[in-house]
Image (spheres, rainbow, N blue to C red):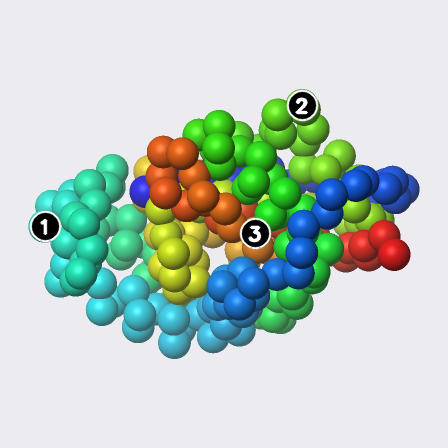
Amino acid sequence: MRIVALALVTLLLPAQAIPGVPGRATAFERAVVQEMSDVRVRPKAYAKHLRELRPYFEGKLWKRPGRVPLRTEEGVAALDEAIAFLESARPMGPLRFNEGLARAARLHAQDIGPRGSLEHVGSDGARLSERLNRLGRWQGLVAENISTGEEGAREVVLQLLIDDGVASRGHRHNLFNPELHQAGAGSAPHRDYRVVTVIDYADGFVANP
């Protein structure tokens, strides 16, 4: 699994304008945020979905039905850890979909996808805080996850939860951070991994008019 998490940033920055903002979020992009919200609200119920995946592991090879086998780094151990985390997690507030965050995420996906990049820094050197600042005004905490290779909303979120090969489990921590209340997802074709989905989170974000 290839997923990239960005550490949290705390700041309040003024708004600046940017041309060429992409269109409104697609059904898939909205579904990713809804799926993340569902797992925050009902973590124990979501653990059942992960349990259903255990029979498809053969060592470090994950043979999901109808999918090309995926060679993981940790095998079923990462899945079991995610299940234990969800079963012990307390329900928390939902994530609210934010169109401005979705635009920022999609712009970054469209930037890194053709270049085959998985970085949180854009081709112009802009980091998440700078990219968000171009589109509106954000406050509190912001964070970013990047997922590749998955075209279903649940599969994207499963990837973030299991966090295979990421010792810090940073994607999972971003998803379950109680100080992040809004999110937007943006997807684009990726040169090496077929599709990339960027998810931007914030405590609060108000887009430019």
Residue 206 drawn at (x, y percent): 82, 56
Element assignment for label 3:
strand
Amino acid at dot 2: Gly
Residue 36 at x, y percent in the picture: 51, 64
The image quadrant where one finds the C terminus is: bottom right
- How far apart are labels 2 and 1 at the CA level? 41 Å
Q: In the visual, does 12 lie left or right of 101? A: right
* Label 3 environment density (alpha carbons within 10 Å; few <14, some 14–19, many ≥20): many
**Picture quadrant of residue 15:** top right
Instruction: Identify the mark nearer the N-term, 3 or 1.
Output: 1
Viewer-nearest residue: 66 or 157? 66
> What is the quadrant of the N terminus in the image?
top left
Q: Quadrant of residue 14?
A: top right
* In this view, the mark in front (3 or 1): 3
Specify which label sits upstream in the sequence, 2 or 3: 2
Residue at 23% in and 49% down: 77
Q: Residue at x 11, y 46 (%)?
A: 59
Alpha carbons under labels 3 and 1: distance apart: 32 Å
For residue 116, side relative to residue 49 (left or right): right
Instruction: State the SS at label 1.
Output: strand
Viewer can see residue 175: yes
* Residues under numbered marks 2 and 1 in contact, where contact means CB atoms less than 8 Å apart: no
Q: Which residue is mark 2?
A: 125
Q: Element under label 2? A: loop
Q: Nearer the viewer, residue 175 or 88?
A: 175
The label number, if any, that marks residue 13 in the structure image: none
Neighbours of disc 1 within 10 Å: few (<14), some (14-19), many (20+)? few
Marks 2/3: CA–CA distance: 19 Å
Find residue 43 and report its image quarter: bottom left
Is 201 rendered above or below residue 35? Answer: above
Give the labeled residue for mark 3: 186
